[in-house]
Image (cartoon, rainbow, N blue to C red):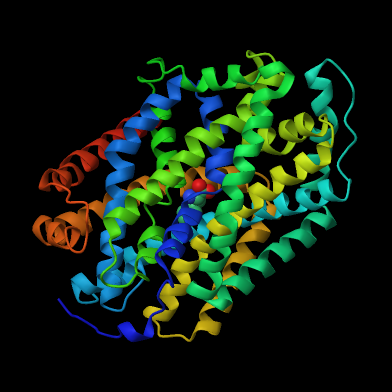
Amino acid sequence: MIIINNMAKREKWQSRIGLILATAGNAVGLGNILRFPSKAALYGGGAFMLPYFIAFLLMGLPLMIIEWVIGRYAGKHGHGSMTGILGLFFNHSSWARILGSIGVAIPVLICMYYIYIESWTLGFAFMSLFKQMPVPIKTANPQEAVKPYVEFFRTYTNPSMIAYIFLLITIAINWFILQKGVAKGIEITAKIGMPAIIIFGILLGIISLSARDWAGLEGLKFIYNLNFSGIKDPTVWIEASGQIFFTLSLGMGAIAVYASYVKPKEDVVKAGFWTAGINEFVEVIIGASIAIPAAFAMFSAVAIPELAKEGTFRLGFMTMPAVLMNLPLGWIASFIWFLLLFLAALTSSLALIQPIIALFEDEMKWEHTKAVSVSMILVITGAHFSAFMPNFIDELDFWAGCVMLLIFGLIEIIVFIWIFGINNFYNELIQNTSIKLPRAFVYVIAFISPVFLSFILYFWVIKDF
Ligand code: PHE
């Protein structure tokens, strides 16, 4: 194994709290507040949650720890990207490079649509603030109430000139922050963004749950009434597992790259638990309390799966403004909703672009400005496909944002546990940590997680093909 010691050259997070907030910001995103409620609604609420929790325990948490441990290990030797990590173990053989590049390709692919949706949230925040959202119709019929917002969304994303301008602004904001670097850019953004996300989220949760005389509480029951009806459907399993990977930013090295900027003595196990904990809090407590309860307050329960079938955006960009704009001072509530989405998306899109920047810097030895510029040009090109190609977003979300994550997660376990070695991994895991995980934890990662993952992929493939 080669040890390249160019540690001094790599940036480091400035503080412990900054590191935790940055990685929490990485994980907490549109996935928590939009994608999760839509998937839960589509696959039957409580029926979706059982596979979801199992996937979290058997794959999400173990993989989170793997990425943190491996990230610190690689960072110690002056590498950040997946290619760097693999190259370290395999003496830079070409197949290691190919695998590593696939790892870096996934976040870039996701970012191509993610950043476009992020730009809608910024656009809609401005529209709310400057009172450009449609005027709510006073009607008892929820379908009628949503109509103006459906029209508005369709015209906006057609795409309109204004949508295009906000896309450019969003790209410029990302570019600016990434150019500032890990500590001065990403860390500072997360220190401001994460507390705001949590405060706005709790506020909106209360607003949604209490809407129409607490009718929103039905929405929570729908999600938390755990049941077995989805357990035989491989699609529910693959979507629930895909959601776990997506929301925790796993299966693409995005966490490992952030972890590679820690100081060599950092307690990464603790940091891993914090990241997963904050993410799940924002997803299953806050995320569950906003969009679905709001929809329940507005529509009959029967209509929810129907609404969900119309896609992720229905809940966030049409139903939510219809609910919020009907409140007194609704434009402020609507502004806060879209600002919340924007902040959550921003701290995640930075994390989607950083892996390729790290690849350019660590592997190709490019200087920072060049690495950032080339990465942004790739993202801009992809964002144009999202804006102008119908169905591009949905297809890419399924393939890059679900299936590829699961496959790459499996590859990560094989490489980082099996090839690196269970003992090597365990020795690295127990260094500098106050949480002494037993060896059995590594056995879960080594045996149960990959078997579970393979089963899900296998049953999903034979069912489909
Ligand atoms: N976890 C983010 C979300 O929930 C998405 C993401 C995936 C961000 C991978 C970074 C890396 O929205």
Point 24% across, 76% down: residue: 92
| Residue found at the far left of this picture | 423
Tag count = 0
| Residue 122 locus on image (x, y percent) | 73, 54
Q: Quadrant of the C terminus?
A: top left
Q: Quadrant location of residue 336?
A: top right
Kindly identify the residue that appears in the image at 27 percent across and 71 percent down: 74
Q: Position of residue 313 (x, y in %)?
A: 66, 38
Q: Is residue 384 left or right of residue 428?
A: right
**For residue 196, above or below residue 376:** above
What residue lies at 59% left-to-right and 21% top-to-bottom?
A: 219
Taking 350 as reference, is 355 left or right? left
Relative to 201, is 259 above or below? below
Give coordinates of residue 174: x percent, y percent. 62, 67
Residue under the point 29% across and 59% down: 268
- Residue 95 seen from this side: no
